[in-house]
Amino acid sequence: MTEAFVQEFEARAGTATADGPEWLEPVRRAAMDRFARTGFPGSRDEEWRFTPIGPIAQGTWRAATGGAGELSREQLAPFVFGHADWTTLVFVNGVFSEGLSAIGQLPAGVRVASLAEALRSDGALLQAHLTRHAPVEGSSFTALNTAFLAEGGMVHVGAGVELTAPVHLLFVTTAEAGGTVTHPRNVIVVERGARASIIESYVTLAPGQSYWTNPVTEVAVGAGAWMEHTRIQRESESAQHVGLTHVDQQRDSHYRSFSLTMGAALARHNLHVRLNDENIETLMYGLYVTRGEQVADNHTAIYHDQPNCRSWEVYKGILDDRSRGVFNGKVFVQAEAQKTDAKQTNRNLLLSDGARVDTKPQLEIFADDVKCTHGATVGRLDELARFYARSRGIPADAADRLLTYAFAAEVVEEVTLAPVREELDRLVRARLGGL
Amino acid sequence: MLEIRDLRASASGKEILKGIDLTVNAGEVHAVMGPNGSGKSTLAQVLAGHPAYEVTGGSVFYRGQDLLELEPEERAQAGVFLAFQYPVEIPGVTNAYFLRAAYNEIRKARGEEEIDSMDFIDLLEEKLKLVEWDSAIMSRAVNSGFSGGEKKRNEILQMAVLEPTLAILDETDSGLDIDALRIVAAGVNKLRRPDNATIVVTHYQRLLNYIVPDFVHVLTNGRIVKSGGKELALELEARGYEWLEDTVGAAS
């Protein structure tokens, strides 16, 4: 349905999707042209080989128009980690809700705003970053997101500033989201020597509702900066979610990401991290927990362009029923990136005979003095551990839940924010049938 | 308490236990000794219900109950405890969480109320003293990254908390230095009561200097070939297992 998007694009003049500074419209148009030219990826596209995007490509999607009318803060309570005091930007069905959002105490030098607002007030900053990290040539979905770029979250942490509390970008859908598509665009800039923890959540108040979320998040981590990025995807299990996060890191910086995939019928997330200078550290943790016929597809790519950097990646999957997991982990080490230390691990636990995983590490190494390892496993619960727990009086089904939880907990415990970690822990336990 | 009659068991179609008879009464400590491959660890694991072994004959009655009919967790709930030769690592679950889960499952099975984490911490404090341990160990993942000695000590801690009626120690002395051995043995001795019993499975006599048995049984090739008092262990230490293997060979 590529044509429908082109028509919508041409018809949107005068609407919010066409707002913004002068430089933006050509960017959107170029992205639209790119999408019109290529359309959705086909089944022969290697990057999308295992990802059933039929429901997206063949679907008819309306632009979301918000509809936050009846929503109250109490309804959002389950999603805010018990911290209504944290700065939280709330987007309901793609539209920013000022009433539901909360700007907490922010140190001087920190800007948090909706993208629409930032396009009016922080145009120069956005011009320097929008599409610079996530190029439209990279993917049809990014092109489409850019063509309809209008709303999302903007976080700017000035040089040397330390954010004491996290900033939360919360995207929530309601029953009104049925049949709609949203293209959230987030820009997160953590300048030189700054420190920030950012949470990005995609949640729903309408489980079972069918809609499509197509977010793109661009992240710039300055020299010597530290950033923790927690991405929580708990969409409706009938929804489609195709997201891309692109991170650029500078010298001596530390970026750690945790990505949870629990929702959506089809969940695809691309995480690309480029290490632009020396002595950078990158940690990427992921957990996908699926059931029914869900598909959880994680593609990660780490670009070691410079020497003396370290990347560490652990993605784990727990798959039940007839659900499927896809993991593709690319590690590119350029010829000049000597002394690179890169480790990638993907481990999968199958809870049923019908569950399946396609896992593919993809290492391309052009430097000769590096330490790069990868490992992938797909298996069942360890029989010996099961017997050990049972021999201590724990019944078989409880032992299974305990060991499954333990498998997940090993990555969840890497989240440094305690309230978030505890909530993720609770979510995993609840999904595994209560512990 | 425990009546084993003509117990036979195999793994992957190979018979390992070829007719074991053993009676253990309350208040007793029995040592089961034997060379490598004699079947002594198999005996310990069969009693705990290890799924890798198939019982092909004989019977085991524990406090009047057919033990072989019970699932591993039901055996534990009935008071049987196996201290593993190779305790299993469970990354992602803290020692405290695991042990409280086990403790509460056993209480639940006995119709007792579960205890909350605060009360459990008090209980733990007391039990930790028994193995001369600091509570820091409780927030580490179960056996994960533990040294060999720590793993064995953790087994005894679990035993102290779960208070079994029948404790089976499978080569608990292997891989322990003398200090760890002393601590582990002291823990076991403090847990001895007139109403419980212990089976100590070991290759070496060394452990029996610390945990003094009432009876010693020697297992070779899947059968108990000799039983006696604690002096039998010393005799074995002096003469080696070949001595008995020779005797058996001559007798048959």
Image (cartoon, coloured by chain):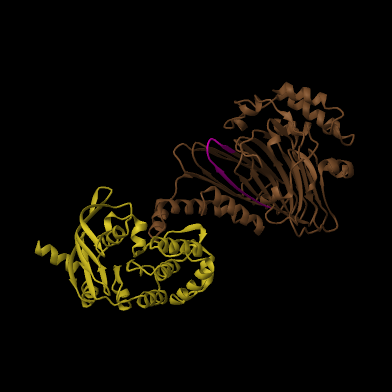
Residue A192, visible in the rendered structure: yes
Mainly helix, strand or loop, the magenta region? Answer: strand
Q: Is residue A132 above or below residue B219?
A: above
- State the image coordinates of residue B61 (x, y, percent, origin top left): 24, 61
Residue at (43% x, 76% y) in the render: B130
Residue at (88% x, 34% y) in the render: A23
Q: Which lettered chain is shown in brown?
A: A
Residue at (48% x, 51% y) in the render: A401
- Number of on-image labels: 0
Going by the image, does A152 lie left or right of B239? right
Q: Is residue A104 above or below residue A247?
A: below
Q: Is residue B171 above or below residue A298?
A: below
Quarter residue A137 falls in: top right
Q: Colour of chain B?
A: yellow
Q: Residue furthest front?
A: A70
Going by the image, does A325 lie left or right of B216? right
- State the image coordinates of residue B218 (x, y, percent, origin top left): 21, 67
Quarter residue B67 falls in: bottom left
- State the image coordinates of residue A171 (x, y, percent, origin top left): 72, 43
* Residues shaded magenta: A281-296
**Quadrant of image for the N terminus of chain A:** top right
Nearest to the observer: residue B158 or residue B123: B123
| Magenta-colored stretch includes residue A293 | yes
- State the image coordinates of residue A294 (x, y, percent, origin top left): 56, 37
Residue B240, visible in the rendered structure: no
| Magenta-colored stretch includes residue A382 | no
